[in-house]
Image (cartoon, rainbow, N blue to C red):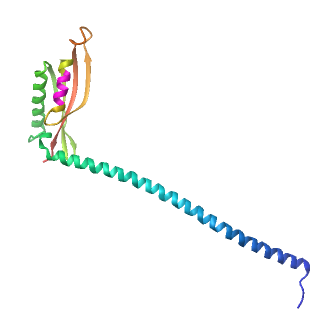
Amino acid sequence: MRRLPPALRRAAALALLAGVLAGVALLAWAPVRWIAHQEARLAALEARLAELRDRLAEREQLLAERRLLEAALGDETLFVRAATPALAAAELQGLVTAAIRARGGELRTVQVLEPAEAPPFLEIGLRLTLRTGLDGLVGLLHAIETNRPLLLVRSLQLVAEESGAAAERKLDTVVELVAFALRS
């Protein structure tokens, strides 16, 4: 058997050493890489868990709102009951006109707004221009708040007279009211 020259033996030994060192490095790198992969996966799962918790909270809120809505649907006094949106608007106009006059106000104009879809309801709206004192306006807003069928104030604009005592000043008011009718 022939011996290899010393330079070749040295090269073979260095190659063997490099292979052993590469194997050791690979053995050290593989667990580190696996741990980094698992940490990234864990972070993604934690983010997904947080998202699902947020969605669960939102779902619970929606279910609570649904229960309230179902309970409200059972109380038919909350809704306008009329054969057509025009008749519903006329009924609301009568209710509001009586409330304004009972509080010493003067109704100047009434505009019936176009009915709007708000499933499962139909929104019936009125825009009123009136003139009243501050006490009359407060009384009117209280009457609107406690009214059956339910009325909501969508917008309110006030302009006060320039002269006179604050308690005696008349207010020019534009109020937009909305009531709801059940879809039949």
Above/below status of 3 relative to 158 = below
Which residue is found at the position 13% from the left and 23% from the top? 100
Q: Main secondary structure of the magenta part?
A: helix
- Whether residue 112 is visible: no
- Across and down, in percent, residue 99 comes to 12, 25
User: Which of 80 and 23 lies nearest the eye of the viewer?
Assistant: 23
Above/below status of 56 relative to 92 = below
Query: Residue 28's quadrant in the figure?
Result: bottom right
Count of numbered tags: 0
- Whether residue 17 is visible: yes
- Across and down, in percent, residue 155 comes to 26, 29
- Across and down, in percent, residue 110 comes to 16, 26
Which residue is found at the position 19% from the left and 49% from the top? 70
Residue 140 colored in magenta in the image: yes
Residue 55 colored in magenta in the image: no
Which residue is found at the position 9% from the left and 29% from the top? 94
User: Which of 11 and 56 lies nearest the eye of the viewer?
Assistant: 56
Above/below status of 82 relative to 14 = above
Residues in magenta, as a range: 137-144
Above/below status of 159 relative to 2 = above
- Across and down, in percent, residue 168 comes to 20, 11
